[in-house]
Image: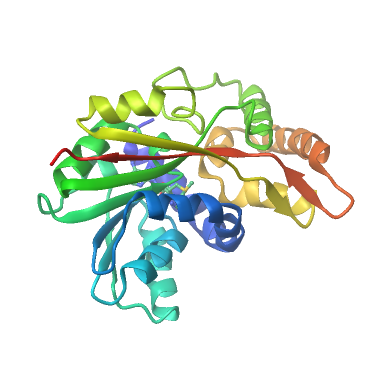
Amino acid sequence: MQNVDIRKQWEGAAPGWAKWEATVASWMEPATMAMLAMADMKLGARVLDLASGAGSQTLSAAHRVGPEGHVVASDISETMLQCVQENARAAGLDNVTTLAGAAEDLEVSRDHFDAVICRLGLMLFAEPAKALAAVRDAVKPGGKIAVVVFTTPASNPFMAKPMQILLRHAGKAPPSPGQPGIFSLGASGVIERLFTGCGFVDVEQRTLDVPLQMASVTQALEMMQEAFGAYRAVLSDTPEAVRAAAWTEVAQTLKAFETATGFEAPAEVLVVAATKPA
Ligand SMILES: C[S@@+](CC[C@H](N)C(=O)[O-])C[C@H]1O[C@@H](n2cnc3c(N)ncnc32)[C@H](O)[C@@H]1O
């Protein structure tokens, strides 16, 4: 998929992503805390948040670096960045700015940032190695990048099973190895090889269980339909009847995660950090 299509996909999902952002933020809270800690973010640091979305982790980073620090939220979707600006203003933060564009085409000063973070973004990039090469130029020697990505389909059935259903209804094949996709960087060793291949050293990884709890199956389905850009994209060029049949089958599948109090699905992420050689 080309970045022009990825931008369109995420512009379409941006209002839904903003609507469900608080749910994603609380789902990803332990991973976000680990990512910020592994990025070694200090008071006064300059931080780049790649693929910021509506910016919940941008704001966490901005609190962490304090008023002397600064966070640049960057995303391919300008609508996402408007949300970041509104959310930063509402939180009373004046140390956040935004930069629109694809991570692969990042244009910032060389050796400018102390740390770079990217939550649930890198695996969706058309050219993650190109983005990491741009990050390597942007971060200071000795500076860190820390990212969160999903692990494998087997450990994330709530994500994997619906994706299989949507692809089948749309008559499309799953992404082949090396292509962007929700699980493209989650298999053993893949992200480590990507980082070292892009000139980073001291790769450090943690695997975290992040079960998703929601009030109901209906809410989980709505979040997937409204906010998950990669899921919406699978059905974007299919007739309405195909979409309706696909989502009906997804709804049936999600019932496997129904509990006495609502919805709970296992999920697993990798938090990975690496350093630009000094
Ligand atoms: C799953 S959302 C994650 C958003 C946010 N980091 C979070 O965790 O809440 C993925 C984000 O990646 C952005 N994105 C996708 N491809 C991109 C690219 N090539 N460059 C920059 N941003 C990209 C999308 O616009 C979207 O905001």
In this view of the protein, can residue 52 be seen by the observer? no
What is the x, y in percent for residue 54? 45, 61
Q: Report the side of 270 relative to 203 (left or right).
A: right
As drawn, the residue found furthest toward the right would be 260
In this view of the protein, can residue 271 be seen by the observer? yes
Placement of the N terminus among the 4 image quadrants? top left
Nearer-the-camera pick, 86 or 154: 154
Q: Residue at x 56, y 27 (%)?
A: 152
Q: Report the side of 52 relative to 45 (left or right).
A: right
Counting the numbered discs, the total is 0
| Figure coloring | rainbow
Image quadrant where residue 4 sits:
top left
Q: Is residue 114 above or below residue 126?
A: below
Q: Report the side of 263 relative to 72 (left or right).
A: right
Q: Residue at x 57, y 51 (%)?
A: 227
Q: Is residue 119 above or below residue 129?
A: below
Placement of the C terminus among the 4 image quadrants? top left
Q: Residue at x 46, y 44 (%)?
A: 120
Q: Report the side of 268 relative to 112 (left or right).
A: right
What is the x, y in percent for residue 140? 15, 49
What is the x, y in percent for residue 153? 60, 27
What is the x, y in percent for residue 12? 49, 51
Nearer-the-camera pick, 143 or 19: 143
As drawn, the residue found furthest toward the left would be 110
Nearer-the-camera pick, 166 or 242: 166
Nearer-the-camera pick, 276 or 159: 276
